[in-house]
Image: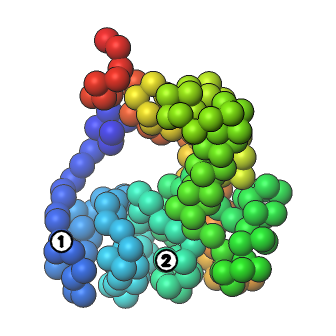
Amino acid sequence: MVLKSGGKVLGTVRHPLNTSDFSSFLLQAQASKAKVIGLANAGGDTVNAIKQAAEFGLMKGRPESRAAARLRDRYRQHRTGNRAGPAASEAFYWDFNDDTRAFSKRFMERIKRVPTSAQAGVYSSVTHYLKAVKAAGTTDSAAVIKIMKETPINDMFAKNGKIREDGRMVHDMYLFEVKKPSESKARWDYYKLLTTIPGSEAFQSLEASRCPLVKK
């Protein structure tokens, strides 16, 4: 994807799962002089990588440089200590619009913290399924999935969502930047929108799908 977009990959490195020391990996990234350090890990590894990157001063004095996590969530961001700069691609942010705020308010009343993209996505998918069952008047899988694929998805999680014939749900994605501590007005106030990525660009094309259900 980087090469197709006209960028350059200056190096890659893999780390063990749940490692506590990212120093050697981060120093290699720093030495490459890359403008973007892409993190393809998740969970605690992402948290620790970002924390240690800040400790090593990877972005200090290099305003053009940033770290980019492929997927993150608010709970993980909270654990990093709201460090400014890193970018993250997300499908959902609790404070994005009136719909996300209304859902998040109900969620927080029960769970006491903001919902993640995964939690919002599960709620959206189950709701879409139940609406299709109601519309079909049956739980027969063939009848239900037909309605699910025919019905656009526009809710608090997905915008311009559509389930394709290969089963992939394509929808808009968002690129956020982590706010500076001085920009954050309250707890969980971490992101500011950089750009919206249309679903047609964010997901693998139907032509490239290897699903046997796709007619080619």
Label 2, secondary structure: give it.
helix
Residue 8 visible in the displayed image: yes
Looking at the rendered structure, the kind of residue marked 1 is: His
Residue 153 placement, left or right of 142: right
Give coordinates of residue 114: x percent, y percent: 66, 74
Give coordinates of residue 77: x percent, y percent: 52, 76
Give coordinates of residue 54: x percent, y percent: 40, 82
Label 1, secondary structure: give it.
loop
Residue placed at 50% from the left, 34% from the top?
141
Residue 174 visible in the displayed image: no
Residue pointed to by mark 1: 15
Residue pointed to by mark 2: 76
Residue placed at 41% from the left, 57% from the top?
70
Looking at the rendered structure, the kind of residue marked 2 is: Arg
Give coordinates of residue 170: x percent, y percent: 52, 36
- The answer to which image quadrant residue 32 occupies is bottom left
Q: Distance between the residues labelled 1 and 2?
A: 19 Å
Residue placed at 48% from the left, 66% from the top?
72
